[in-house]
Image (cartoon, helix red, strand yellow):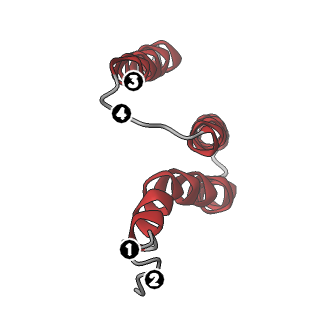
């Protein structure tokens, strides 16, 4: 039941993003698609391994999975929004000078 719910949620989010991109309300670069895909796959693997290890009563290993796989998934997900913010700060001004942070 969990995987059905997660599949529906991911499908709705993906549909929403694609509709916004086609409507021109959202601009998504190719690397954001790659980062999002890797982040979602890592997050789903983390959930699967965490729940499986919890059912086997391996609490130390399940907590380690959260750290080893969940943290990179969150960091990659955060990079999707952080990279464009950094790029906006570094856009050149009208006289060709670069802005400094």
Question: How far is disc 3 from disc 1 in space, using C-alphas?
Answer: 35 Å
Residue located beneath label 1 in the image: 93
Q: How many marks?
A: 4
Q: Pick whichever of labels 4 and 2 is earlier in the sequence.
A: 4
Q: Nearer the viewer, residue 24 or 37?
A: 24
Closer to the camera: disc 1 or disc 4?
1
Image point (42%, 87%), residue name: 100
What is the C-alpha distance between the residues marked 4 and 2? Answer: 28 Å
Q: Secondary structure at mark 4?
A: loop
Q: In the rendered structure, which disc, 2 or 3, sits on the residue that comes first in sequence?
A: 3
Q: Residue 69, image x and y in percent?
A: 66, 53
When the figure is inspected, residue 96 is found, relative to residue 71, above or below; the finding is below
Is there CB contact under 8 Å for labels 2 and 3?
no
| Tag 4–tag 2 contact (CB < 8 Å) | no
Q: Earlier in the sequence, mark 3 or mark 1?
A: 3
Q: Please, is residue 88 above or below residue 76 in the view?
A: below
For the residues labelled 4 and 3, the Cα–Cα distance comes to 13 Å
The 10 Å Cα crowd at callout 4, few under 14, some 14 to 19, many 20 or more, is: few
Q: Nearer the viewer, mark 2 or mark 3?
A: 2
Q: Which mark is residue 4?
A: none
Q: Which residue is mark 3?
A: 13
The residue wearing badge 2 is: 97
Secondary structure under badge 2?
Answer: loop
| Residue bearing mark 4 | 26
User: Are circles 2 and 1 on residues that touch, CB within 8 Å?
Assistant: yes
């Amino acid at each position: 039941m969990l995987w059905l719910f997660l599949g529906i949620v991911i499908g709705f989010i993906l549909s929403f993003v694609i509709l916004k991109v086609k409507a021109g309300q959202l601009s998504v670069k190719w690397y954001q698609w790659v980062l999002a895909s890797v982040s979602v796959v890592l997050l789903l693997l983390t959930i699967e391994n965490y729940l499986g290890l919890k059912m086997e009563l391996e609490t130390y290993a399940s907590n380690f999975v959260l750290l080893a796989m969940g943290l990179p998934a969150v960091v990659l997900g955060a990079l999707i929004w952080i990279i464009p913010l950094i790029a906006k700060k570094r856009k050149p001004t009208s006289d060709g000078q670069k802005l400094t942070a």
